[in-house]
Image: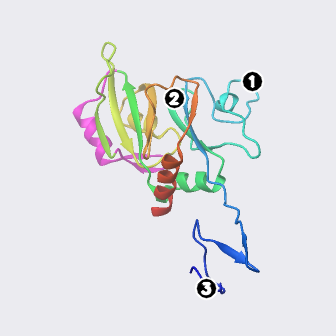
Amino acid sequence: MRGQVAKLGDRAMPGDPVLLDNKEIKLARSASARVILYNKPVGELVTRSDPEGRATVFDKLPKLSPGRWVAVGRLDLNSAGLLLFTDSGELANQLMHPRQEIEREYEVRVQGGLSPEAERSLLQGVTLDDGPARFLRMEPATGRQGEGTNRWYRVVLSEGRNREVRRMIEAVGGRVSRLVRVRFGSVRLPLDLPQGRSRELSAGAVAEIVRTAKSC
């Protein structure tokens, strides 16, 4: 507290003056985590290097020194859309942990569309080789035009297992021809961000992400 001699366990709040031998000292502030979002195109791998020399998402990210960018989850080679990266491995692990149940939202194009029965099954739950899975919400993707008999859907789930959306739709007899992630938690893919480009989140947006991770 202000005007008192500090004792073991006391904490100084931001802006509080701290004196040692009647001289004010400056306390170093711990750096806040940085987070960038990236609009991944189809054909890029979420890996730092590829033995076959294929393009990776890290090729186009801004340079970070010291440290390095850590991917928050993945998208497979044939999927596109929102990826988050942070310079904090701890934050990345928190956001990826299954107990957080952070929503992921996708726009998915299915060849030939899905029957009402298949849609109900996806909402009620299907069994995959790594356990049960279900969509929290599923609806037609407004603003997306289907080609021929293909149909676009907007789906939401609260986990990020490998190729989960594709495998779920395959489990009810469908086939995904395009998959785009448009949201991760509170972060949406900006409509004005071209594929292959990144953008750093504001301090407020990062604080919201951190609060989400710590509250779960």
Nearer the camera: disc 3 or disc 1: 3
Q: Tell me if 90 is positioned left or right of 117 in this view.
A: right
**Occupied quadrant, residue 191:** top left
Establish if 103 lies above or below 38: below
Quadrant holding the N terminus: bottom right
Residue 29 at what x, y percent from top left?
Answer: 67, 61
Counting residues from the N terminus, which is met first, the one under dot 2 or under dot 3?
Answer: 3
Quadrant holding the C terminus: bottom left
Q: Is mark 3 on a helix, strand or loop?
A: loop
Q: What stretch is highlighted in magenta?
A: 112-135
Can residue 150 be seen here? yes
Which residue is under mark 3? 4
Q: Is mark 1 on a helix, strand or loop?
A: loop
Residue in view at x 46 percent, y 49 percent: 159
Crowding at mark 2 (Cα within 10 Å: few <14, some 14-19, many 20+):
many
Which residue is under mark 2? 79
Establish if 191 lies above or below 208: above
Give the distance between the C-alpha atoms of the residues marked 2 and 3, in whole angstroms: 58 Å
Mark number, residue 53 = 1
Give the distance between the C-alpha atoms of the residues marked 3 and 1, in whole angstroms: 62 Å
Q: Is mark 2 on a helix, strand or loop?
A: loop
Counting residues from the N terminus, which is met first, the one under dot 1 or under dot 2?
Answer: 1
Amino acid type for the residue under numbered disc 2: Ser
Residue 120 at what x, y percent from top left?
Answer: 25, 41
Residue in view at x 58 percent, y 31 percent: 198
Crowding at mark 3 (Cα within 10 Å: few <14, some 14-19, many 20+):
few
Q: How many marks?
A: 3
Residue in view at x 58 percent, y 24 percent: 196
Residue 160 at what x, y percent from top left?
Answer: 49, 45
